Structure formats: structure tokens, C-alpha cells
Amino acid sequence: MAPNGDIGTEAFANYILAKRSIRRITARAIWADIDSTFGSAPSDSSEVWRIATTAGGFTGSLTAKNIDGATPASDGIIVAGGDLDADITILNEVRNRVQVSGALPAGRTMYVGSSLTGSGTTMNFGALAGTLAFGGNIDKPITVNGPMTGIIAAGGSLTQPMTLGTASAPGLEGLVLLNDAAGGGTWAADIRVAGPASPPLSPAPYYSNTDYSVGGGSVALVPTRLHGESCAPPRNQTTPPVFGSAEFCNLGYLTRWTCLPVPATPAPVPYGSADLRLTFYGPVFAEDPTVCPVYVWYIDPQGVEHNDPETDVDYAAFIDWSLIPDSSGGFARTLILSGRDQTQLIAGRYRVRPRLNGGARLLSDGLLVTLDVPVGENFAYDFQLYMDCNRNGVDDAADIAANPTLDADMDGRIDCCAGPNCLTDYTLDGNSDQDDVSYLTNVISGGENPSGLDPDFNHDGNADQDDIAALIDVIGGGDCPNL
Ligand SMILES: [Ca+2]
Ligand SMILES: [Ca+2]
Ligand SMILES: [Ca+2]
Ligand SMILES: [Ca+2]
């Protein structure tokens, strides 16, 4: 079928239906729903040889068992001068090239049940904002000569190179998902994000190129992992990022300024609120939307991680969390953690770990199959808090060093922060610290209370999670609860 003009119009799309194969359709532009499997069980002969436009787009849909023309130089899906504004379902293989001068627009999907085969077969788009998915491998080269803001997914492996973007503009704004059927697929060919001369992402699959440097998007091999370089702050287990407890818990600069005179040195540095942004290579979601999908464990001064879910305190219970969707497909790749202003956290080092077991796991999202796949590693992301009970953005130890009168009783805490006395030393060892939080947590969950202190720390008549939060807050530098 080769009319001189268009097939269909924007207002009137045609149906072109065949029980077996459709050989060649070429027109200036096409508005049509084309189906070569109509009314029949798709056999290998339900194939399409060529769908081509010469000066416009193809708008509509196409369904076939295979794209399989006899003339590799000219058969395939060729859209010259427009977009492939169509939903394409190829049940088995594409055996000829796909050449689209424009885009696969957002909201459109091209699905290939198996993969690409055939001598010289390639896929080439001007831009890609929709979804291009393969049930199997990606076995032929794919090029997007502009921004790739959509999704390219392979149920299996990437075995041939993928080239996105241009030399002047990195093109990986969306997601490339490999092994997206959660089998044994691998990332076995180069992915370049700034045209054919750019260096490939490396080392695959857990490359160090940041999201920012590739265009904002990501390549993920399922099961996905934490992308340490793209976290904010970047992951650094040797020298973890440091925040003031008031800053991290969003308590606000100088809200307790009446507590002490302005020190000349060190000069206070105004601060905003701080959070941690843990970014993953691929999309993730919380299995139970009501439970934080990570743990936050305390690391003691000896470096021991207190991480027993039965007996240790999971500080995630006192931290706010959310997963933020990114631009492609509404999937989330970033988990935000920040302190909660009711619970000023205790100074010290903390470690974020994923929940990999139980019913509140951190799972991979965007899979081509329905499976629960937790993230692929028990990653660690550490951060450190210093005590800033007077909320001036300066470590209280530095405040005291600059002005020793702030700590007349020399217990290491600025005196005016302590407020009315309340008994925080549940272990009766002379210090108020995480051990006391662990002790109270154990008592409230039914454990022994040899020290005999009242577990109803906030004196509201119940011994519960609120008492643990209040104890953390006081040890962290907050006020004692009203007595
Ligand atoms: Ca301070
Ligand atoms: Ca003191
Ligand atoms: Ca104690
Ligand atoms: Ca209570």
C-alpha cells in the first residue's frame, strides 16, 4: 500500500487489519491502527514488513508477531519527518531496523516480546519520552540522538551498545532498566550518554558517574543498589557527613537564642534544615507505606553497630522519611530522611541500612514482572550528628571551649539548655546516652527494670513509644517534658 499522500487524518484514523501478514505500507504520514494479528492466533506469518512515512509521523497503533521484511535496507518501521506517536506491540521479534526521526512521545509504549534480530538491525530515535520495553535482551544497538526522558527496559541483558544524547547535552534524563524481569540478565555492553564519542558509564553496573553528569537519569541493573555518588551528601563511610542535631531535626536557627549570649568566636553560622537524600540506581518503593523501609542504627564510639531489630533501638522510628518520584514514569529513586522537630536526636554516629526481610522491605520498582525484589545489597550509609542544644549551628563542645562559663557544672552540656531536671540516666551509670534509650525501650517492650525508674518519662500515665521519643529529645538537647 503506497498512496501518494497520507493515510488517515488527525481527525480520522483508519483501521488496517489483516488476519495474516501485512507487507509494506508507505505514505507521507499515517494515522491508523494497524493489526496483522486480527482475528487469528498470531502465527509467525502475522508479520509486517514495512511501515514507513516519508514526510510526517505515524500516529495510532501497530500490532504484529514480527517485523520481518525481506529487504533490510528499506524494511522495518521508518518514520521520516515526524514522531512515532503510536503504541507498538511486537509479540516476538523485530528483525528490521526502527528509524524514527522524531520522538516516541510520553505516554506511548513500544513493546517487543523478545528482542531485536537480523543483520544490520538497529533502533534509532530522535528523542524518547515514552517507554521502550523488551521482554528479552537488547541484542542490537539502540541510539537516541537527543534526550531520553522515558524508560528503556530489558527483561534480560544488554548485549549491544546504547548511545544517548549528544556531545553537547547528556541524554540520560530517564531510566534504563536491565534484568527488569529479575532473572539472570546482565549489563554486558557500553552505554554512552553524550553521543557516540563519549566515554561509557563505568564501572558497569555500579558506575560512579553522578546523576547530574549523565543528564539526571540512571541505569539500573535489577536488583537495584544505592548509588553512593548520587546521594546528597554523597556516601562517605570514612568521613561521614556531619550535621548539627538542631539543623538535622529542623529546629531552626537561633530559636533558643535567649539561652546564651552571642559568642564572638566561633561565629554562629546560620543554617537551614538538613536532610539526607539516598539515591538508588533504579526505582524503589516501600513495601509497607506506613513503615520506613530502612533502619537507622546507632554506632557507638567503639564503632559497634547496634543493629538487632529485636533488642536495639531503630532510630528510623523517630525520623521522617519520604520517597520522591522523579521525572520518568512517576517512579521514586530517592529516599529522603530528616530529623523530626519533636525529637532532637542524640549526638553520635548513625548508620542507615535497608530492610531486606519482613513485610516492610525496600523493594525494586518498575519491574516488567510481578515480583517482590528487595534492593540488592545490605548497604550502609553513615551520618554524624553533633549536639547543638542551643541551636546556633555550632557544636556545643566548641561553644563551651570558646566560653567555659556556659558549662559551669562541667558536665559537657551547656547549662542553660538543660532546663528543669528530669532523670534521664535510666541505667544509673552516670551518663545519659543511647544506652538509656535502649534500656527504656526494653522496659517498655516488657523487659526487666532493675533500676526502678518510672518508664513513664513524660508523665502522661502511659509507658509507650512517646516516652522513648521524649527521652531521646532530652538527651539530644531538648527540654524536659512538663512535670
Ligand atoms: Ca551550639
Ligand atoms: Ca552543663
Ligand atoms: Ca546511662
Ligand atoms: Ca508516657
Image (tube, grey):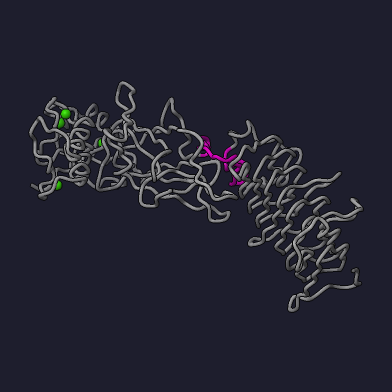
Who is closer to the viewer here, 363 or 175?
363
Outermost residue, front side: 41
Q: Place residue 349 in its image quadrant.
A: top left
Q: Position of residue 69 (x, y in %)?
A: 88, 55
Q: Is residue 280 visible?
A: yes
Q: Position of residue 331 (x, y in %)?
A: 53, 52
Q: Residue at x 75, y 62 (%)?
A: 41
Q: Is residue 405 visible?
A: no
**474 left or right of 353?**
left
Residue segment shown in magenta:
210-230
Q: Position of residue 444 (x, y in %)?
A: 17, 40
Q: Residue at x 77, y 64 (%)?
A: 37
**251 left or right of 365?**
left
Q: Position of residue 79 (x, y in %)?
A: 81, 60
Image height of 97 relative to 279, above or below: below
Q: Residue at x 75, y 46 (%)?
A: 142
